[in-house]
Amino acid sequence: MSVLGNFGEVRLGRDYTPTYTGYTDYDTLRAGERIDLTAKEYALLDYFVRHLGEVVSRTLIAEHVWDMNFDSDTNVVDVAVRRLRAKLDDPFETKLIHTIRGVGYVFRNDGP
């Protein structure tokens, strides 16, 4: 399976090794279907892909995607992840974004 975005094509192998091919546009494809993402959704997806298979905390996401100190009273990261999931995961059987309760999120392909 592959995900395409502004970072290029990322092939999600069983060993979670990403392969980038260097696309420069903002199109994102999954299973051949185009997915329209906002600039922040692209940045979040890019961060997840660069940390493929790693559990990343909300604090790290906020610092790297929003360039802000994380305030535990805000749900900006959770809302952004939910919006990305609605576009990238909900229409498909295999989910890529997984919540690690009390820790953060992990981007991985658990499917076939």
Image (spheres, rainbow, N blue to C red):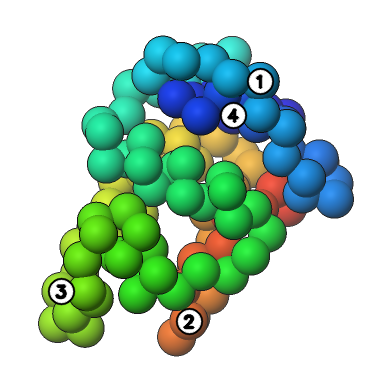
Can residue 78 be seen here? The reply is: no
Q: Residues within 10 Å of mark 3 (few under 14, many from 20)?
A: few
Q: Where's residue 33, x and y in %?
A: 51, 15
- Residue at the (64%, 53%) spot, across then down: 52
**Mark 4–mark 3 distance (CA, rounded to whole Å):** 29 Å
**Mark 3–mark 1 distance (CA, rounded to whole Å):** 35 Å
**Mark 2–mark 1 distance (CA, rounded to whole Å):** 31 Å
| Amino acid type indicated by mark 3 | Thr
Q: Which numbered tag is attached to residue 74?
A: 3
Q: Are marks 1 and 4 in contact (CB under 8 Å)?
A: no
**Mark 2–mark 3 distance (CA, rounded to whole Å):** 15 Å
For residue 3, what is the image quadrant?
A: top right
**Mark 2–mark 4 distance (CA, rounded to whole Å):** 25 Å
Q: Which numbered tag is attached to residue 68?
A: none
| Amino acid type indicated by mark 1 | Thr
| Amino acid type indicated by mark 2 | Val
Q: Residues within 10 Å of mark 4 (few under 14, many from 20)?
A: many
**Mark 1–mark 4 distance (CA, rounded to whole Å):** 11 Å
Q: Which numbered tag is attached to residue 3?
A: 4
Disc 1 target residue: 21
Q: Are marks 2 and 4 in contact (CB under 8 Å)?
A: no
- In this view, the residue in front, 51 or 108, is 51
Badge 4 element: strand
- Residue at the (45%, 85%) spot, across then down: 102
Badge 2 element: loop
Q: Which numbered tag is attached to residue 103?
A: 2
Q: Residues within 10 Å of mark 1 (few under 14, many from 20)?
A: few
Can residue 38 be seen here? The reply is: yes
Reply above or below: 110 against 42: below
Reply above or below: 35 against 51: above
Q: Quadrant of the C terminus?
A: top right
